[in-house]
């Protein structure tokens, strides 16, 4: 027969969870100030580029829609 697993109390499971959580949290590699600044600038630049692209596409669709309205 299969072996029965030992029942672990709720309190012990909570303790284990927080021990594991603390252990994993110590493994996190946090970026320094220079890396954070560089990544922030990259994100802002990407947002600006994507915003300009969306603006241009919107402008083209609006112009095309106006052109179609004049024809019909």
Image (cartoon, helix red, strand yellow):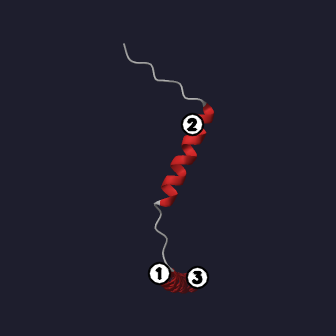
Relative to residue 12, is residue 67 depicted above or below? below
What residue did someone put label 3 on? 69
Image position, residue 6 (x, y; %): 49, 24
Could you give the CA–CA distance between mark 1 and mark 2, rounded to whole angstroms? 38 Å
Label 3 neighbourhood size at 10 Å, few (<14), some (14-19), many (20+)? Answer: few
Q: How far is the residue under mark 3 from the one under mark 1?
A: 51 Å
Sequence-first tag of 1 and 2 = 2
Residue at 53% of width from left, 85% of height from top? Answer: 48
Which is nearer the N-term, disc 3 or disc 1?
1
Disc 1 crowd rating (10 Å Cα; few below 14, some 14-19, many 20+) is few
Numbered badge on residue 35: 1
Nearer to us in this view, 9 or 58: 9
**Position above or below: 41 against 17:** below
The residue lying furthest to the left in this view is 1
Quarter of the figure with the N terminus:
top left
Q: Which secondary structure, mark 2?
A: helix
At a point 55% along the width and 29% down the height, the residue shown is 8
Q: Classify 13 as above or below 39.
A: above
Q: Where does residue 31 sit, x and y in percent of width and height?
A: 48, 75
Label drawn at residue 13: 2
Measured in 3D between alpha carbons, the distance from the residue under mark 2 to the one under mark 3, in whole angstroms, is 67 Å
- Tell me the quadrant of the picture where the C terminus can be found: bottom right
1 relative to 29 in the view: left or right: left
Residue farthest to the top?
A: 1
Residue at the right extreme of this rendering: 11
- The image position of residue 58, as x and y in percent, is 54, 82
Report the mark closest to the observer, 3 or 1: 1
Which of the two discs, 1 and 2, sits closer to the camera?
Answer: 2
The kind of secondary structure element at disc 3 is helix
Instruction: Tell me the SS state at disc 1.
Output: helix
Q: Position of residue 39 (x, y in %)?
A: 48, 80
């Amino acid at each position: 027969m299969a072996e029965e697993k030992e029942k672990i109390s709720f309190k012990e499971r909570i303790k284990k969870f927080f021990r594991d959580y603390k252990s994993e949290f110590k493994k996190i590699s946090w970026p320094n100030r220079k890396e954070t600044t560089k990544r922030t600038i990259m994100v802002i630049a990407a947002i600006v580029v994507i915003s300009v692209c969306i603006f241009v596409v919107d402008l083209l669709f609006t112009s095309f829609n106006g052109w179609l309205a004049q024809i019909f």
